Amino acid sequence: MDELLQKIYDCVECGKINAASPFPPSMRGQDGAQEYTKSALEAGYKPSEIMNEAMIPAMGVVGEKFSKGQVFVPQMLLAAKAMNAGLTYIKPYFKSGEVRQKGTFIIGTVFGDMHDIGKNLVAMMVEGSGYNVIDLGIDCPPEKYVSALESNPGAIIGMSALLTTTMNNMKTVIDAVTKDHPKTRFVVGGAPVTPEFAESIGAVYGKDPQDVVAKLDKMIEAN
C-alpha cells in the first residue's frame, strides 16, 4: 500500500483521530486520520482510493477484532471517530457523485428504548464501509421510519433494541412500513434479539457491527 494511504489506514485502525487527539499514547502529537486524509486529497489521491484502499479495509479489521473480542467498545468508537474525521473531507464528493456509495441505511433505536451505544457503533461501522447512513436516533416510532424511507426510496432499515420489552416493537415498525412499502428489507439487532426472533418478524439478524455490514453487502449484491 502507498505510504500516505497506509498512514490513513493505520490511524483509522488504532483510533488516531487528529493531531490534537491524545490517543493512542504512542502517537501523541502526530497527525491523525483527519490531517492525512486532507493531505491525500491535496496530493491528488481520488476520494474513492482513500475510502476503498485505506478507510474501509481498516474498519473491516477493527470490526473483525471486535467480533473476536480482541478489541472492545472504546477502541471501536475511537476507530469510527478517526474514520469520520477523515470522512469530513470525503463527504462532499458523495454529493458530486465522484464517490459512489453502496446504498442507504436507515437506522434507529426502536420506540420505547433509549439505548444508543450499539446503534451508534453500527451506524459508524456501516458508514465507514461505504454506505449513506441516516441515523434516526432513539425512541423511534413507526412514522419516523416511514417518513425516512419515503425520502430515501429503496433504503434498508435497521432497528436496535436492548430490552426484551421493546424488541417486540420491531414487529410494529415492520408492519407499519411494509403496509405501503412491502419490498422493504430490515436488519435488526441488540442484546435480546436472536436470529429466530428476527426471522419470525421478517427481518435479518445482525449480531454485531461487522455482521451487519456483511448482511447489508449481501442484500445489495442480491438486488
Image (tube, rainbow, N blue to C red):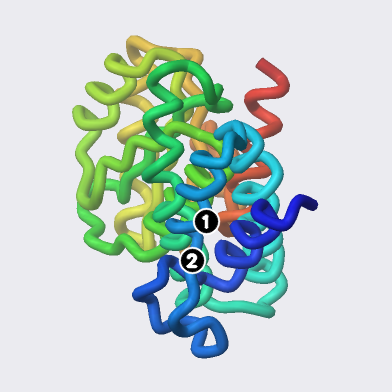
For the C terminus, the quadrant is top right
Q: Is residue 122 above or below residue 126?
A: below
Tag 2 near tag 1, CB within 8 Å? yes
Give 114 or 10, whichever is nearer the viewer: 10
Q: What residue is rendered at 29% in x and 63% in y? A: 115
Q: Quadrant of residue 178?
A: top left
Task: Name the residue: 65% across, 54% down.
Answer: 4
Q: Residue furthest front?
A: 43
Quadrant of residue 92 in the image?
Answer: top left
Q: From the viewer's side, name the closer residue of 223 and 14.
A: 14
Q: Is residue 3 above or below residue 127?
A: below
Residue 212: % across, % down: 59, 47
Amino acid carrying label 2: it is Gly
Q: Secondary structure at mark 1?
A: helix
User: In the rendered image, which residue does mark 2 sit on?
Assistant: 32
Cα gap from disc 2 to disc 1, whole angstroms:
6 Å
Q: Visible in this render: residue 107?
A: yes
Instruction: Report the disc number at residue 7.
Output: none
- The one of 145 and 6 positioned closer to us in this rendering: 6
- Is residue 196 visible to us here? no
Residue at position x 49%, y 55% in the image: 83
Q: Percent from the top left, x then y, of residue 45?
A: 61, 36
- Side of 58 relative to 135 (left or right): right
In the displayed orientation, state which residue is furthest to the top.
180
Q: Is residue 218 left or right of residue 213?
A: right
Residue sitting at the far right: 1
Q: Which residue: 40% across, 83% down?
A: 22
Q: Which residue is mark 1?
A: 36
Number of dots carrying numbers? 2
Name the element at disc 2: loop
Amino acid type, residue under disc 1 in the picture: Tyr
The spot of residue 206 in percent (x, y) is 58, 50
